[in-house]
Image (cartoon, rainbow, N blue to C red):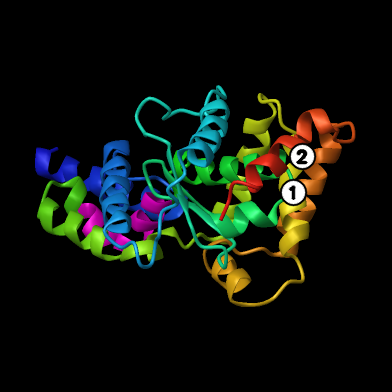
Amino acid sequence: MKPIIVRAFVAIAIAIAAITCGVNIFPASYDAQLGANLDQEIRKNPREYPLLNNETVRSTVQGMVNEIIRSPLVEYRDRFPYKVSIINDPGTLNAFCTPGGYIYVYTGLMKAVDNEATLAAVLGHEIAHAERRHATKRMTKALGAQLLMDIALGQNSSRTTELAANLFVGLALLKNSRDDEAESDEYSFRYLQTTRWYPGALGFFFEKIRGRSGGAIERLLSTHPLPQDRIEANAERVRKANLPPPTEANLRTQPYQELKRMLP
């Protein structure tokens, strides 16, 4: 069989697998570059993303992330920076992680939660989006079969990669699907099982936002949809793991209240 025909068959197989089986055609280095670019974009826009100038708060949250990524399930700890920034916006109840591991937490979310464990669960969820490479997987699907075949055959690769980047402008890149959210919830739970925090604490966050309304909640749900099955799945994970009731030792409410008092 001629080499060009072999490459064509391989390209078709890659395209079909990418669209139907969740294969990611982009290397992890592309996630890292996308994240670095988006991080620069955010830092150039202090009006929309005013960063909190408090290294004590930032380093405390960074320390939490550093503990979570020691989980053996975290594959890219040495390839993604997992760098924390705090956005000083008390009216926004949200957090996000860019491809490649740049983590942003809004002061509005930090003020809304009651203990370290809940914040740790949210951080674990965001880390999972980067680890599971959800953004570039969605980009793979969005490109379509023909462009995927072009990439596989080495044709117009620069044009195709540029198009991929343009498919998601700014934080539109971070709009997660229900499947993405469910997978990140699962991995957050599993990450926290290797830490000092209560693994089921994401349920406390769900309780905080369920039934609330307003712009802050709408912005959160625009990137992190919360169907009832996410709530039920978390409760089922807690049940299957036979977790004892949480205690102050694994919730760490008191230290967290002290941290919250440092927020503007």
Against 25, is 109 above or below?
below
Closer-to-camera residue (153/246): 246
Residue placed at 59% from the left, 62% from the top?
93
Q: Does residue 186 appear in the picture of this structure? A: no
- The quarter of the picture where residue 3 lies is top left
| Secondary structure state at the residue bearing disc 2 | helix
Q: Nearer the viewer, residue 129 or 170?
A: 170
Q: Amino acid at mark 2?
A: Thr
First in sequence: mark 2 vs mark 1: 1
> Looking at the image, which is closer to me, 76 or 248?
248
Name the disc covering residue 229, or none: none
Query: Does the magenta run of residues contain 136?
Result: yes
Is the stretch drawn in magenta largely helix, strand or loop?
Answer: helix
Image quarter (top left, top right, bottom left or bottom right) of the N terminus: top left
**Residue 222 in picture, x, y percent from top left:** 54, 69
Q: CA distance from mark 2 to mark 1?
A: 6 Å
Asked if the residue under mark 1 is in contact with the one under mark 2, i.e. CB atoms within 8 Å, the reply is: yes
**SS label for mark 1:** loop
Residue 253: give its label. 2
Viewer-proximal residue, 123 or 129?
123
- Is residue 48 left or right of 113 when viewed as pictured? left
The answer to whether 226 appears left or right of 57 in the picture is: right
Residue topped by disc 1:
114
Which quarter of the figure is the C terminus placed in? Answer: bottom right
Give residue 165's position: percent from left, percent from top: 25, 58
> At x 29% / y 39%, what residue is drawn?
27
Type of amino acid at the residue the image marks with label 1? Asp
Q: Residue furthest right?
A: 245
Q: Residues within 10 Å of mark 2 (few under 14, many from 20)?
A: some
Q: Which residues are magenta?
A: 135-149
